[in-house]
Image (spheres, coloured by chain):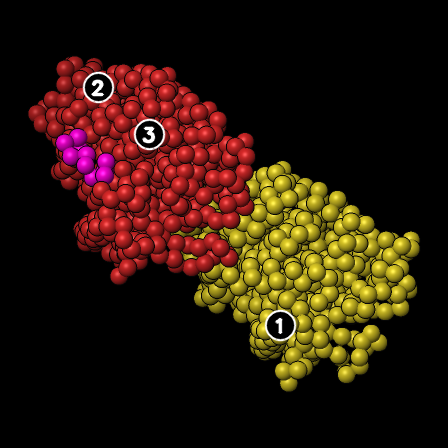
Chain colours: A yellow, B red
Amino acid sequence: MSRHLPVLLVVVPLMAAPIAALVMRARAAWLVALAASWWAFGVSLALLRRVLAEGVISYELGGWAPPVGIEYRVDEANAFVILIVAAIGAIVVPFARQSVEAEVSEDRGALFYSAFILCLTGLLGIAVTGDVFNVFVFLEISSLSAYALIALGPDRRALTASYQYLILGSVGATFIVIGIGLMYVMTGTLNMADLAERLPAVSGTRTIPVAFTFLTVGITLKLALFPLHLWLPNAYAYAPSAVTAFIAATATKVAVYLLLRFFFTIFGAAFSFDTMQLDRILMPLALVAILSMSLVAVYQRNVKRLLAYSSVAQIGYMVLGISFASVLGVSAGILHLFNHALIKGALFMALGCVMYRVGSVRLDSMAGLGRAMPWTMAAFVVGGLSLIGVPLTVGFVSKWYLVQAALEQGNWPVAAVVLMGSLLAVVYVWKVVEVAYFGEVSPEAGIREAPLGLLVPTWTLVLANLYFGIDASLTAGVATRAAEVLIGGLP
Amino acid sequence: MSPGALAAFCVLLPVVAAGLVLLFRNAPNVREGATLLMGGATFYHVWALLHYVRDHEESLRFSLVEVVPGVELAFDVEPLGLLFALVASFLWIVTTLYAVGYMRGHHEENQTRFFFFFAVSIAAALGVAFSANLFTLFAFYEVLTLCTFPLVTHHQTEEAKRAGRVYLGILLTTSIAFQLLAIIWTWQLAGTVEFRDGGILAGTATSGVLGAILILYVFGVGKAAVMPFHRWLPAAMVAPTPVSALLHAVAVVKAGVFTVLKVAVYVFGIDLLGTLSATTWLAWVAAATIILGSLVAFRKDNLKARLAYSTISQLSYIVLGALLANEWGIIGGGMHIAMHAFGKITLFFVAGAVMVAAHEKEISRMHGLGRTMPITFAAFFVGSLSIIGLPPAGGSWSKWFLGMGTLEAGQVGLLAVLMVSSLLSLYYLLEVPVKAFFFRPPEGSHHAEGIHEAPLPSLIAIVVTAVATVGLFLWPDLAYELMSMVVSPGVAE
């Protein structure tokens, strides 16, 4: 059985999705989702442990050898991504029980959990597969289920947000499949390792740079790199709280992984950065994202939108690290992928608690919550401090590596921008803190602390923020190894 | 337990105290008693570390965890840190006593929250004192900023909120934009962030680069209130006076100048520091802060504001001491941590006592108050002597050594700055007790007939610190001994 773990990671949740839809009762569907997500988490831990001990895991689907058959290939980079996606899934599903009950109507509950499991499956599939067309298939699975999940939000604007994401996301996915198609035409293979070997021979042609470009645009759209981020703020703001917590912590992270996989493993760092000069595009966009999006976040009155713009800025940090194309830079990017998932997951779940009791996440509705919902707001404060990058939190560890990567290349202005982003984060985080702790809550509203079912998952992620901020040896170690593997080409 | 673990234990004790404060939130006397007890225990254990520092036999380093490869969260006990820890832990006890009188006399709300964050702040200050490397110091430094925020904004008024923004804004901006950059740059160049005798940066880069890093450190340590990053200090005066007294005369500001001294001695090393041109330039920035702080203090009628600017000025004495880059400067600067702490805390205690007992905040309205509150204003007189630098107060010793430091550095101009500042502080500080004792009360004031001093616990605290100020003049030995060990490590005393 352990031999088949890479495929079971995806197959078990995939089978669970229709079961969740069939059981029809929301509570039962939730149980199915719980089982599927916890299964995925367990498998992800086992996979990471095996990869760290034995090296790359290669699995042939159905026993058919690549390049004709589909191969699932797990190295340190995607084992790490699989872990964070599965972990977030395993924590958000328990959170979802009460949160979704409050925000999504009962008759849609089973469909909700079915779509949720499908989304999880899709994301895990993108991360685990070694075949580029398989990537596209799972990308579509995760995207379509995400559109459905977002549309289930309690606010009517969720429909338009979902539609906007659908249009833009489909454009992105189409660009990606065009890129894949062009690569297939020139090399005759869809297997990642095989492509890496065959691409250098044809990279002189006109077709391959065009394929590269289509892929860049498509992936950066999915990644929500400025200026292709327009779908993100509304999608995050109006989706159900559990969906926002899940997607904010996973979807863009998997897109970052795709960036890494295509541009380091398949095309190779030399082609991507020396020939195609990808860093000349990524770095400026990342810097603009960090500064402009943090600034926009400051002026938001809806806290979920505030955090959504913050997420676009944080994606800028990840892409910035990658654009250095050095071991230090790429490991900073991968590390922040993990850390940011923990940070935003915790923050959005805290907001989910607020939504549950208050029914709104507008800034003015949060007045005085520091007293009315002390544990929830304390979780928000710790998550906010992590976002700022206070030492002893994960956010600090990411900044440590990022600034180091910049200084290693003698790049002063970039180091300054990274730190400036932290200062802007102080402003928008403190806006919320001030309202919560200095405002007055009206006693008739009768706001109580959130229930344990919501607080426990939230605080689990908050404590993870602190744990991995104090002892970052595991995460930093794996990120560095992953970066070494990626930059060194295929192992 | 090993001495390093003992240091970690000292940092833990105030955290335990904070827990006890929460536990006994409904029994104020037990709550305050718990704080005093834990304060005593903390001071006792910090004092016990003195023996190990004198011996210098065993390694005192204690590592908690390795955060990222090569960077640990670790504690180490060395003489400068021990001096700071002794001052902070002793004055915690005294200030708690004072706070009991003040908070109750002033009918302050949210006292549990107050004593809770007070205790946590002391833990953070001790963490800074006992840090073994720049990362640990930075971590506790930031914790100190964050957990003093609820204390500064205690009253939760609009004014408090605005002051809190200035406080946090300046301190976090300087620490993230400058100090963190300097630390990561140091890590890049030296391959380590550990504090070592003789520094870690020697020979790692050109003097231009090292000078830039020094500038980043000095301005990055916002808590040292070097101009132009000083505005947080007067803004923080909106806090209840015990907060101003302990944190902004002792713990927070001393953590700042302590960091500057620590970086000067254990990251750069005095020898390297002396070779950089940036050192001289920054010394004059400190000198400017000394003079400008005193000049602004002159114009303030609000007593706490005057004391705030006096503190800004006095902190730059210590920064100057560090930047003189010679032994006398370091010794003088370090000793001033202790001398200024005891002197200034007395002055702040008086300011609070006057607020509680006579409801006055402006100096012009305190004329004649000396007849109603003789002990209080006598203490103010003694504390002032220390700040001015006159015998029989401890501040005279640190001034003396700082003066010697300027001469050894060949900077007579800086000596003149010290003298001018003393003259200015003579006027703006002694004005208070002199007018309190010898002038008639102003029109429309309601000073009580007969003696009407501050509440007793507060009065006891005031007398203790005033007596200690004189005591430090008569027995400066411990402070001198510890600072001598800093400048000549490994030499048997």
Q: In which quarter of the image is the N terminus of chain B?
A: bottom left
The residue lying toward the viewer, choosing from A242 and A278, is A278
Q: Earlier in the sequence, mark 2 or mark 3?
A: 3
Nearer to the camera, A292 or A374: A292
Disc 3: which residue: B329
User: Horizontal and vertical percent for residue A331?
Assistant: 62, 56
Q: Tell me whether circle 1 and circle 2 mark residues in contact (CB < 8 Å).
A: no
Closer to the camera: disc 1 or disc 2? 1
Q: Which residue lies most toward the front here?
A: B491
Q: Specify start and end residues of the magenta stretch as a single range.
A: B472-481
| Observer able to see residue A294 | no
Q: Name the residue under label 2.
A: B430
Question: Gap between marks 2 and 3, in whole Å?
Answer: 27 Å
Q: Mark 1 points at which residue?
A: A51
Of badges 2 and 3, the one in the foreground is: 3
Q: What element carries label 2?
A: helix
Q: In which quarter of the image is residue B295?
A: top left
Residue at x 84% of width, y 61% of height: A199
Q: Do labels 1 and 2 share a chain?
A: no
Give x and y (percent) for residue B126.
Answer: 32, 47
Residue type at mark 2 is Leu
